Image (cartoon, rainbow, N blue to C red):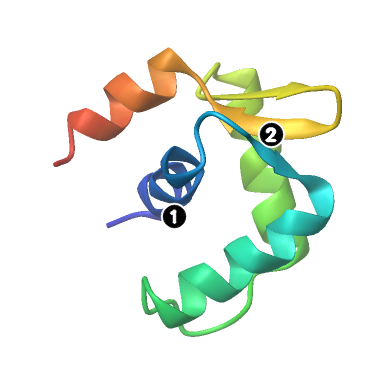
Amino acid sequence: MDIKIKTLKYFNLTKKNGRSYSDLISLDRYLVNVEKERIYLGEFLIAEIDKMITQGLIDKKNEKYSITDKGTEYLMEFK
């Protein structure tokens, strides 16, 4: 499973409230501990999230990141 799917799964857990930039530290821990990534991703992860924003899979409003309907549909394709 690629990092995009793992990241969208994380954002889908908190779809209503969204996540702040500082919450992305929790995302890194989630990827390592739950999704079994081997290393913390740091800046690479931020770059990937920026790509997903551009693709319309994640939205950023008022300093909160959240999964979009398009992101949810994309995620459902891989379940």
**Residue at 39%, 54% in the rendered image:** 6
Out of 47 and 36, give the one closest to the viewer.
36
Q: Which mark is residue 3?
A: 1
Residue 26 locus on image (x, y percent): 65, 66
As drawn, the residue found furthest toward the front would be: 17
Q: Secondary structure at mark 2?
A: strand
The reply to whether callout 1 and callout 2 are in contact (CB within 8 Å) is: no
Image-based side of 25 in relation to 8, left or right: right
Residue named by callout 2: 65
Label 1's element?
Answer: helix
Q: Rounded to the nearest whole Å, what is the CA distance between mark 1 and mark 2?
A: 16 Å
Q: What quarter of the picture does the C terminus occupy?
A: top left
- Quarter of the rendering containing residue 50: top right
Who's the residue at 35% across and 25% down the image? 72
Q: Nearer the viewer, residue 79 or 39?
A: 79
Give, as a three-letter code, the residue at label 1: Ile
Q: Is residue 28 left or right of residue 75?
A: right
Q: Residue at x 38, y 47 (%)?
A: 9
Residue 57 placement (x, y as % from top left): 50, 24
